[in-house]
Image (tube, rainbow, N blue to C red):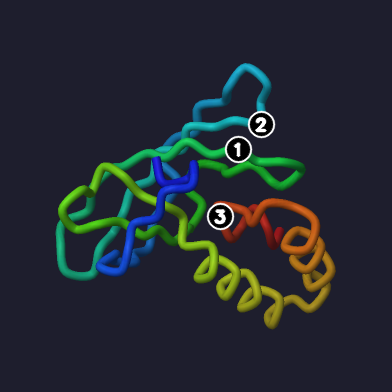
Amino acid sequence: MFGLGRKPGANAVTARGEIAHVDLGPDQTRYTVGVQVFPDDAAPFLASIKVHLRGTAAPMLGEETWVRYRPDDKGRIDFDRDRIKVRAYDRVRANPALQRVVDTVYTHGDPPVSVIATAR
């Protein structure tokens, strides 16, 4: 999956997603995350990605996220971490007490795969 260093490329599409399932690995830092993707101009579809998180909040079912994918290969996605970060800071504007949490996660850990897990 793209989460292991392969990027979707210049023709990637960004879409809103929702965490549909999470399968924990044996060490509970590796996850297979199923994401229901909701493109603006196409039917929703389910895709998955393997991620390795170090010291950040794990994704939870139903959480909002943002993904990038190639239109010709919708089964392979990558999290759009820049868009996720923007949404996390949107939540900080609504609740300034979250600023420290979000800043800490983005400074000292892998960027999270979901907005709500970052800013709760």
Q: Is residue 32 above or below residue 86?
A: above
List the residue tagged with mark 1.
52
User: Picture quarter containing residue 46?
Assistant: top left
| Residue 115 numbered tag | none
Taking the spot 38% from the left edge, 45% from the top edge, the residue there is: 35
Task: Name the amino acid, label 3.
Answer: Ser
Give me the C-alpha separation between circle 1 and circle 2: 6 Å
Residue 42 position, x and y percent, is 15, 62
Element type at mark 2: loop
Name the residue at the top extreme: 26
| Figure quadrant of the N terminus | top left
Horizontal and vertical percent position of residue 38: 28, 59
Q: State which tag comes first along the sequence, 2 or 3.
A: 2
55 and 41: which is toward the camera: 55
Q: Nearer the viewer, residue 101 or 109?
A: 109
**Crowding at label 2, few (<14), some or many (≥20) Cα neighbours within 10 Å?**
some
* Image vertical order of residue 51 relative to residue 84, above or below: above
Q: Label 3: few (<14), some or many (≥20) within 10 Å?
A: many
SS class, disc 1: strand
Residue at image location 48% in from the left, 58% down from the top: 64
Give SS at disc 3: loop
Q: Amino acid at mark 1?
A: His
For mark 2, what is the residue? 29
In the image as oriented, which residue stretches furthest toward the bottom? 93
Disc 2 residue type (three-letter): Thr
Cβ atoms under marks 2 and 3 closer than 8 Å: no
Q: How many marks?
A: 3
Q: Is residue 95 left or right of residue 3?
A: right
**Residue at the spot of label 3:** 114
User: In the shown orientation, is residue 101 left or right of residue 49?
Assistant: right
Q: Are marks 1 and 2 in contact (CB under 8 Å)?
A: yes
